[in-house]
Amino acid sequence: MTVVQLHPAAAVADAVKVYGIGATQVRALDHVTVEFPARRFTAIMGPSGSGKSTLMHCAAGLDTLTAGSAHIGGTELGTLNDRRLTELRRERIGFVFQAFNLVPTLTVRENITLPLDLAGKAPDAAWVDALVDVVGLGDRLHHRPAELSGGQQQRVAVARALAGRPQVVFADEPTGNLDSRSGAEVLGLLRQAVDTMGQAVVMVTHDPTAAGYADRALFLADGRLVDSMDAPTADLVLDRMKAFDTPAGSTRATALTAAVSAAHTAADPATTEPTAAAPTAATPTISAPTTVPTAATGPRGSDRR
């Protein structure tokens, strides 16, 4: 029997996000409509202040839209109260953050299974073991984050995001704190999650090399979706990004940063970290990669499909 995907993994429609009022008002998103398909790796690119992080936060239910709608599968996020939104983030979304966000007092295994533990669900031992093999940390399961390198910590974060088989994984600058080799390892894991696990991945990045791991790159400028590129390469993305290097972009970035900071300070939203837990599914067979693409080369052609 063929399973038909009725909805994209995530989407926003006519999305508007405004920070501030009056003279300090900044329109971070300006009527953006985009879908993030299942089993695809999408990179969101743009200069500082373009709205790329705001788009991800609103699509993932970490922030609310001023107007328009955001959806995870067939669920419109704006129709959910705080409790149901928290449950949706925990059960259907995985997150990978630039700062890792591991719990320092927990071991590697405990960090990986934390979303399921919080949801009161028993971890699928076979699935967790498969993830541990993929991220290559089988000999570090009883270590704590302080005993790991930055790359190892981010690999734990990727495994945690996938532990509950979420509908979509959102990654916010996942290689921003890593050296080139560690970054390539993390990007390779995200690529493998799409290719071998059927995962949907949405990644915000400023790095053209990172975008080269994706199936599609979206480009934002001044809060608008201005371009899209299928099968991006680091060189093509870099050429496209050069068009954004203008003084006006820098001014907007400064204004947007100030407006977002002021809005968050005023709202003082709950800071509970959303995590992923999951629909039940058969445990697939996953093989740990025998080679890791380097940041200099990245995946090419059929190697990344």
Image (tube, rainbow, N blue to C red):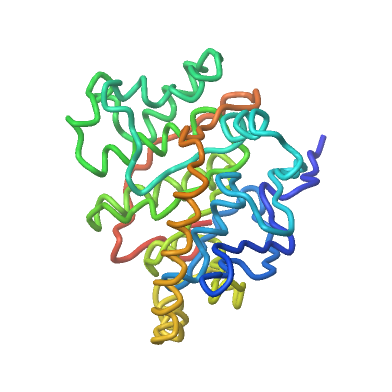
Foreground residue among 95 and 32: 32
Tell me what residue is drawn at x 32 percent, y 65 percent.
297
> Between residues 121 and 68, which one lies in front from this camera angle?
68
Instruction: Please provide percent x and percent y for residue 48.
Output: 41, 70
Residue 77 % position (x, y) = 70, 43
Count of marks, rendered view: 0
Does 105 appear above or below 152?
above
Nearest the viewer among 293 and 35 is 35
Report whether 42 appears left or right of 32. Answer: left
| Left or right, residue 138 beside residue 31 | left
Q: What residue is shown at x 56% (from left), y 70% (from top)?
A: 25
Q: Is residue 55 left or right of residue 79?
A: left
* Position of residue 146 measured from the top left corner of the image (x, y, whole percent): 19, 31
**Where on the picture, by quarter, is residue 16?**
bottom right
- Percent across and percent down for residue 153 are 28, 37
User: Which image quadrant for residue 31?
Assistant: bottom right
Q: From the viewer's side, name the closer residue of 164 and 196.
A: 164
Residue positioned most to the front: 22
Name the residue rendered at 65%, 35% in the picture.
85
Image quadrant where one finds the N terminus: top right
- Answer with left or right where residue 84 lies relative to residue 95: right
